[in-house]
Image (tube, helix red, strand yellow):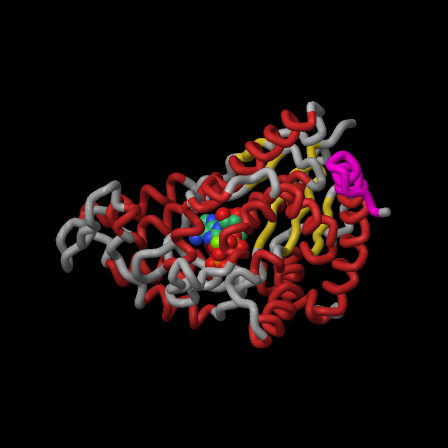
Amino acid sequence: MEQRVILSGIRPTGILHLGNLLGAMRHFVELAKDPKNFCMYFIANQHAQTTGMDPVSAAEMQKELLGIVLDFMACGLDPNSDNVLLYAQSSIPETSELAWMLSCVATVSELMGMHHFAEKREALKTGSDTASTGLLTYPVLMAADILGPNAHLVPVGADQHEHVELARSLARRFNNRFGVEHFRIPELLEGPGIRVPGLKGQGKMGKSEPKGTLSLHDSPDLIRTKIKKADKRLPDNLSTGEKSIEPRIEDQPGIPEKCRVYLLHALACNSAAEEMEIQFGCRRGTLRCGDCKHMLANRIVDMLTPIQERRRELNAQGGEKLALEILHEHGKRARAIIAPNVQAIKELTGIPTY
Ligand code: ATP
Ligand code: MG
């Protein structure tokens, strides 16, 4: 049976959150249940260096990386399965060699034009003269992550579509220039298409934006407190173009589609009937906002409790030591797939290892 190589990464920039769970992890776990898929999931520690490159970030990142391996398992990924590899990006030094070769195919203007360069530069409050070169060129490293193992499918959220498009362009350009079909052109795999907003403010929920984030490790009490304080107004960019409005005034009938709490209910609900119950209660004004938030908190506590229990079991079985063993073993296996491909490209481009 020919398997499809599925490749995706997650940055060790903090503890995983509800957005990562609903937008990525759940999908990754489902994909790995299909034996037709060969799933290569990596922890993108080199990409994380674009956010923090100093002694404190270095120490935090190593801890977070091991935590993410354990959280992947707590969310249901089985690293003992034949069709799963869970590895650190830095375990495959050949990917950086490939990124170099691809950077000689990519143009400065296409990198300068990528949304992420502008957005991240803004988020890091860095002017154009102090933004690191890594921030500009990391999409090329991501192209190398994808093209190194000749991935068929890349499941990523909407925020990453532009990067997959770049990987496709670079693969085509390289193949044309050398007159070979060396790289497979990777396809984007549409995921759940979910973008979980932060509990507060304007942005999406994000690891490097701890304000407004519900971490997979938050205790039930903390989840309840955070949801009690959550904004009801949607972030403006989710409010279909116009500026967001107050979705509910006291006991008046509410407008659920304008409410962040309702959106979170809809994302976390198990059935359409549950979602309808909240929607009608809000629209009729019979479900009070406090009760609606309380129901959401319970829903999320119920979702996270089994993950947290499983994580405690993994900690008891060796925790970080267990994660390190997986990284060593899977890193070796991933490298055995990627290194020969990169070697072939080095030879093709005239830079063999003499
Ligand atoms: P950072 O703030 O450091 O960029 P992040 O929370 O955005 O961290 P990533 O490591 O960049 O997480 O992304 C991992 C995966 O989780 C990607 O597939 C991304 O699309 C998905 N993801 C991240 N945040 C959300 C969100 N709020 N809603 C849905 N999916 C998300
Ligand atoms: Mg991100």
Instruction: Looking at the picture, tell me which residue is in the foreground, 252 or 33.
Output: 33
* Left or right, 346 with reference to 157: right
Q: Quadrant of residue 120?
A: bottom left
Q: Position of residue 161 (x, y in %)?
A: 48, 39
Q: Quadrant of residue 227?
A: bottom left
Q: Please tell me whether residue 351 belongs to the stretch shown in magenta.
A: yes
Can residue 5 be seen in this snapshot?
A: yes
Residue at coordinates 43% horizontally, 41% vertically from top-left? Answer: 271
- What secondary structure is the stretch in magenta mostly built from? helix
Can residue 305 be seen in this snapshot?
A: no
Q: Position of residue 300 (x, y in %)?
A: 45, 58
Residue at coordinates 74% horizontally, 49% vertically from top-left? Answer: 94
Instruction: Looking at the picture, tell me which residue is in the foreground, 351 or 55.
Output: 351
Residue at coordinates 49% horizontally, 70% vertically from top-left? Answer: 219
Q: Position of residue 157 (x, y in %)?
A: 49, 44
Q: Is residue 253 above or below residue 56?
A: above
* Left or right, 62 with reference to 273: right
Q: Please tell me whether residue 268 belongs to the stretch shown in magenta.
A: no
Residue at coordinates 20% horizontally, 44% vertically from top-left? Answer: 242
Q: The N terminus lies in which quarter of the figure?
A: top right
Q: Position of residue 28 (x, y in %)?
A: 60, 45
Q: Which residues are magenta?
A: 340-353
Instruction: Looking at the picture, tell me which residue is in the foreground, 263 or 276.
Output: 263
Which residue, as the protein is rendered here, is positioned at the far bottom?
Answer: 56
